[in-house]
Amino acid sequence: MQDANLRYPEIGISEVSLTFGGKIGYLDEQFCQVEDLQDEASPNFAEEVVTLFFKDSARLMSNIELALEKYPKDFNRWDAYMQQLKGSCSSIGASRMKCEFMSFRDYCGQGNVEGCMRSFQKVKREHTVLRQKLETYFQLLRQAGPAGAATRPVM
Amino acid sequence: MASCKGLGGEGSAPAPHVLAVDDSSVDRAVLASILRSSQFRVTAVDSGKRALELLGSEPNVSMIITDYWMPEMTGYELLKKVKESSRLKEIPVVIMSSENVPTRINRCLEEGAEDFLLKPVRPSDVSRLCSRVLR
């Protein structure tokens, strides 16, 4: 991933990486695992999974938003919905979003409505940024073509 | 990539058929890919209900891997139904969950689950299953 930083500095891909000096990257090692599942039969598997993730996560976040409005102080329900979203995030390695789920859970445990609301807004922001970064990442990979994919560093 | 060597190749026994059950489309896709790259034949469904329908019509399922938390029928409830069936009870069932809850894990193992995997599932988990569950 460090070599990828040199190859794609313009999209800040240093942030699409494992933790460096305490800073949490947008993606963790699980994303590498997903990319490693690509083969000749499924050359775009990672992008397909990411597309599924953003489709799924948009729906789940919409459900959460509705639940926050429709079921005031129903912390168990809110937490249950968030856990569904957390599961999908774990599968693609969305580490910053995963971190925020822990904060959300803590706020639910404390019965802190404002904290939950703030935390959910942060999840939404991280989701948007991650989508933008990954769209750019896959666009660059497509532009680089097979040669670029062949030189992608192996973790 | 880890694989169940000696299975499914030309002239050898057919590849084991794994039924993957998960309501998350993302998790289903990743799990199915890991299983296929380990030379399993995979059918992926999105609910316990669909899993039971398939088990009713497909005679040769070698293993079931199911998520724990699913709407309508949890993986635990699916496990119980499989183990209560005289026709299905010998099929190994593996439970997956993104949460490490010891009471949940113990309950599943006591009910007859072969193993309990923490999500996200890795190829190394599948390799371990291959050698333990399908030997």
Image (spheres, coloured by chain):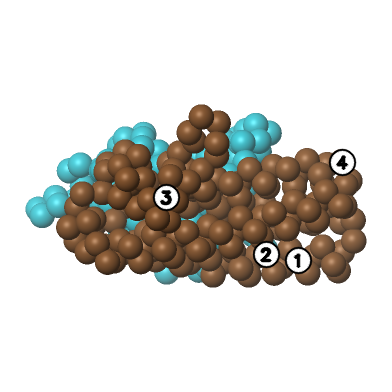
Q: Estimate the spatial distance between the alpha carbons at disc 4 and disc 1, rounded to whole Å.
A: 19 Å
As helix, strand or loop, the secondary structure at mark 1 comes to helix
* x and y, in percent, of residue B9 in the image: 14, 52
Which kind of residue does numbered mark 1 sit on? Glu
Q: Which residue is mark 2?
A: A61
Q: Are marks 1 and 3 in contact (CB under 8 Å)?
A: no
Q: Nearer the viewer, residue B105 or A83?
A: A83
Q: Residues within 10 Å of mark 1 (few under 14, many from 20)?
A: some
Check the image and report above or below for B131 versus B98: above
Disc sitting over residue A13 in the figure? 3
Q: Share a chain, discs 4 and 2? A: yes
Chain on which label 4 sits:
A
Q: Estimate the spatial distance between the alpha carbons at disc 4 and disc 2, rounded to whole Å.
A: 22 Å
Q: Nearer the viewer, residue B21 or A8?
A: A8
Residue B116 in sight: no
Q: Which residue is mark 4?
A: A110
Q: Quadrant of residue A14?
A: top left
Disc sitting over residue A65 in the figure? 1
Q: Earlier in the sequence, mark 4 or mark 2?
A: 2
Q: Share a chain, discs 1 and 3? A: yes
Q: Estimate the spatial distance between the alpha carbons at disc 2 and disc 3, rounded to whole Å.
A: 25 Å
The chain letter corresponding to cyan is B
Q: Earlier in the sequence, mark 3 or mark 4?
A: 3
Chain on which label 1 sits:
A
Q: Residues within 10 Å of mark 2 (few under 14, many from 20)?
A: some
The chain letter corresponding to brown is A
Q: Quadrant of residue A81?
A: bottom right
Chain on which label 2 sits:
A
Q: Nearer the viewer, mark 2 or mark 3?
A: 3
Residue occupying the point 31% across, 38% down: A155
Q: Earlier in the sequence, mark 2 or mark 3?
A: 3
